[in-house]
Amino acid sequence: MRLLKDRSNPHTWAGDILAHAGYLEDAERAYAKSPGSDGDPPFILWRAWVVYGHRERAEKLLESTINPEKRSARFAAFADLLWRMGQPAQARPQYEAARTAAAKIVDPTKRKQAIATIDQGLKFVSDPPPEIISATPSARSRVNAQDSPIPPFPITAGGFQDTDPKTADRATADAELIKQLYDRAVAGDRASVERMIENATTPFKKALAIASLEHVFIQLGRPEQAEQYAKSIPETDSSSSLAKAEALSAAGAAWVRVLNDDRARADFNVARSVASSVPDLPLGRVSVLVSIATAQIQARMLEDGEGTFRRSIELAQSFPQRPVTPPGVRRPMTPPGVHYIDEAFEKIVHAAIQVRNVKIANDAVKIWSKSGDNADSSLVDAWLAAGQTNEAIDAARRIEDPERRVSELLSLARNLLYDAGAPIF
């Protein structure tokens, strides 16, 4: 396998990953298989030599470089790497060597650009780098919103309308409104909040105001009042209807926390009914149903949750297929208001994996695959996002198409390497 269909080079890709991991001999073998390899060590490889304790190999390469432009660039890059490794005293003479080489560049424009790059490096070489590069890995932790002890805001604050300049301005105004509402609700000034609800200029602003009060009661452990406010959200339009469905689901989760499964199930069922009845905003409808299904399964209402997931799968199948983009051509921007089947199914698969419902995830991928999309790649991503490395690897190895399997395994290796804290250079 020389090049992939998108013209990317799997051997260079593998070499870069191995070099960053410190497997230098393996990296060299991978680079050697790259089509058109001229024997000149790749940029990432000789930087890996420096990071992983083989600086003399990099210095030998630099000294053997005759072309002034290439020599200047390599010495400047070497100096920058030493600075980022916390060795400014050793970086400065390398910058000076780069300047000496740059002075011999014949093309005046290129000479000027090279010297400007060197001067910029010298300007900052005495300052500490933003992050020290080290061969010792420093694991990076993934932030999971589910780990927060504070229940999430009951509704999606931005709504589900497609963004444009007007909706962006509205989102900013809504964010300020939420802050005002929440501050007054926390302070116990319910009268002010009630006035803001009455004076809301749009149905969605009214939903935001009501949800702010609901959120306070959820945090106080008072699901009865939270539920009352959720039910009071008017179903004036599709956005407010979806907000009401989310708010009812949040009330259901609040009932679960006080061990009242009957009230919780009732709220979840009404939430699902409201979301299913919305006539437009298809992606928003799928998103809300997926969030309800997630809440049901987290409440150990497995049969109910799977039923809601399957309803979202039914809706996802009605989305249009994304147009095929020829290899090497950038995917065009999605037209406003248009959503494709891959967007809907990605939400379903990722949510199912998050609640460890493998059956729903696999069923969704099986149905999604019939559309011709790379559904199995999304399954790999979902497992990885959930922190289930072995499952992600197994899913990647099950991809039937050899090129996509190679691409997915390399992408997975790169992500695991990053999570493990390998140096970035």
Image: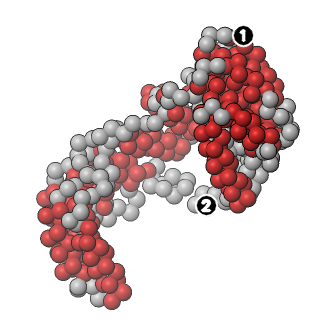
Q: Which colour assignment does the render follow? A: secondary structure
Secondary element type, mark 2: loop
Q: Is residue 110 visible?
A: yes
Q: Say the numbered circle drawn on residue 262.
A: 1
Q: Residue at x 28, y 80 (%)?
A: 115
Expressed as whole percent of the image width and height from the top left, the position of residue 49 reads 21, 54
Q: Residue at x 46, y 44 (%)?
A: 411
Expressed as whole percent of the image width and height from the top left, the position of residue 136 reads 23, 42
Figure quadrant of residue 290: top right
Residue ID for mark 2: 330
Expressed as whole percent of the image width and height from the top left, the position of residue 317 reads 77, 36
Expressed as whole percent of the image width and height from the top left, the position of residue 8 reads 48, 56
* Alpha carbons under labels 2 and 1: distance apart: 51 Å
Q: Residue at x 36, y 47 (%)?
A: 17
Indicate the amino acid at tag 2. Answer: Arg
Sequence-wise, which precedes: disc 2 or disc 1? 1
Figure quadrant of residue 255: top right
Q: Say the numbered circle drawn on residue 72.
A: none
Are the two marked residues, 2 and 1, in contact with CB atoms closer than 8 angstroms?
no
> Compared with residue 271, is residue 94 higher up or lower down, i.e. above or below?
below
Mark 2 crowdedness (10 Å alpha carbons): few <14, some 14-19, many ≥20: few
Front position in the image: 177 or 270: 177
Indicate the amino acid at tag 1. Answer: Asp
Q: Is residue 349 visible?
A: no
Front position in the image: 144 or 183: 183
Quadrant location, the C terminus: bottom left
Mark 1 crowdedness (10 Å alpha carbons): few <14, some 14-19, many ≥20: few
